[in-house]
Image (tube, rainbow, N blue to C red):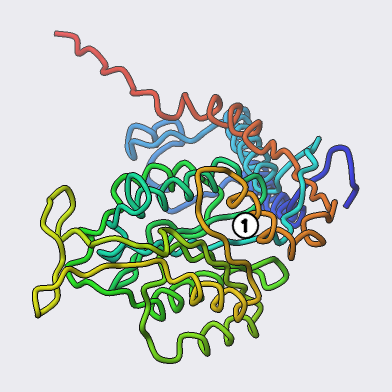
């Protein structure tokens, strides 16, 4: 197949043009040797149309019909063969970087030791990630006792921004932070992506976790090529946990004591180290978000530098359809009713 100029995408369809030959042979045979059936024994030939209601076509009419339908056949076959010319070179797909953001929406994220609250600061961090991002595909999972996929891995950051205002601690009826379940969902999303690209998880949380085997699970992810970065939200001084959003009631234990929540900086740093990632503390600046994006894109730099292109031809089969439809228009014309004379 030539690399440029006119050619057919599926030239094997052109063999169908040979189907005109048997039709042409039958037409020549029927013209030179007209069929004489038994009905000719009972009436003269010029009276047969009045007897049968069918008029024999003369030679010119037969050839006219053959030419018209042969032209239709040729146009249809050429359209099926896929004529095309000129093309556009586009960048071929190359594996890039994928980052799954795990957002903790447990009740401790309502603590206001950072203003206006830990969760509001976390949402701001995600907004910064999306707005600063230029080369990383991002997915979002919100979790507490249950993990919810807010957005699969996508290049459409606007869809993530649209979902952020709805992410509150009221999304889960059962409280608690089950990080292992969220890591499982993140691994499922990343497993469908090319292994050649970078695969990372960013955990945004206050580190209020008490699950057995958590570090072992993170180590298994790192061995599978999935890094874990952690972004701590809150302060080590901590603060009381509101019972409900916008209410002054505070969460208390069984003895009636107010429950305080503090940033578990040590655990988050240990998790990042085990996951071969980076631990950062969230602040109002963009430095933390920029560093996370740089680390997430680092492993896929070699893959994204590939300058491969693929050639996309402009299909022109529809050019054959317009004359084909024009030829078919008389076929669908309604016959005019004949007026009966009194």
Q: With 247 as the anchor, is 108 left or right in this view?
A: right
- Find the residue positioned furthest to the top: 342
Q: Residues within 10 Å of mark 1 (few under 14, many from 20)?
A: many
Residue 238 vertical position relative to residue 161 in the rendered view, above or below: below
Residue 305 vertical position relative to residue 270 in the rendered view, above or below: above
- Where's residue 292, x and y in %? 62, 57
Screen quadrant of the C terminus: top left
- Callout 1: helix, strand or loop? helix
Q: Residue at x 26, y 16 (%)?
A: 338
- Where's residue 227, x and y in %? 62, 73
Q: Residue at x 55, y 70 (%)?
A: 190
Find residue 253 and report its image quarter.
bottom left
Q: With 31 as the anchor, is 338 left or right in this view?
A: left
Circle 1 residue: 292
Front residue of 111 and 23: 111
Q: With 55 as the anchor, is 146 left or right in this view?
A: left
Q: Residue at x 90, y 48 (%)?
A: 2
- Where's residue 118, x and y in %? 36, 54
Front residue of 186 and 328: 186
Q: Residue at x 83, y 54 (%)?
A: 305
> For the image shown, how many numbered marks are present on the structure?
1
Q: With 74 as the anchor, is 109 left or right in this view?
A: left
Front residue of 66 and 36: 66
- Where's residue 90, x and y in %? 76, 44
Residue 45 vertical position relative to residue 191 in the rendered view, above or below: above
């Amino acid at each position: 197949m030539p690399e440029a100029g006119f050619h057919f995408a599926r030239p094997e369809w052109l063999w169908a043009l040979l189907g005109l030959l048997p039709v042409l042979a039958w037409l020549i045979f029927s013209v030179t040797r007209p069929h004489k059936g038994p009905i000719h024994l009972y009436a003269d030939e010029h009276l047969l149309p009045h007897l049968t209601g069918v008029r024999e076509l003369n030679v010119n009419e037969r050839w006219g019909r053959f030419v018209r339908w042969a032209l239709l056949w040729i146009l249809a076959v050429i359209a099926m063969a896929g004529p095309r010319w000129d093309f556009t070179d586009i960048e071929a797909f190359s594996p890039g970087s994928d980052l799954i953001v795990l957002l903790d929406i447990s009740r401790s994220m309502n603590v206001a030791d950072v203003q206006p609250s830990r969760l509001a600061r976390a949402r701001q961090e995600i907004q910064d990630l999306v707005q600063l991002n230029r080369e990383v595909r991002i997915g979002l999972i919100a979790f507490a006792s249950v993990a919810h996929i807010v957005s699969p891995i996508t290049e459409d950051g606007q869809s993530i921004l649209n979902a952020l205002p709805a992410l509150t601690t009221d999304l889960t009826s059962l409280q608690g932070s089950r990080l292992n379940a969220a890591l499982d969902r993140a691994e499922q999303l990343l497993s469908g992506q090319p292994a050649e690209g970078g695969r990372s998880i960013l955990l945004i949380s206050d580190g209020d976790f008490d699950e057995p085997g958590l570090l072992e699970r993170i180590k298994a992810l790192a061995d599978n090529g999935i890094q874990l970065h952690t972004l701590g939200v809150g302060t080590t001084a901590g603060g009381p946990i509101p019972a409900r959003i916008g209410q002054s009631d505070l969460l208390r234990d069984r003895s009636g004591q107010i429950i305080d929540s503090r940033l578990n900086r040590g655990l988050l740093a240990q998790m990042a180290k085990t996951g071969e990632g980076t631990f950062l503390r969230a602040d109002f600046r963009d430095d933390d978000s920029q560093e996370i994006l740089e680390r997430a894109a680092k492993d896929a730099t070699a893959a994204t530098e590939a300058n491969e292109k693929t050639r996309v031809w402009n299909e022109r089969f529809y050019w054959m359809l317009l004359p084909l439809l024009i030829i078919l228009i008389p076929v669908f014309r309604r016959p005019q009713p004949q007026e009966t004379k009194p």
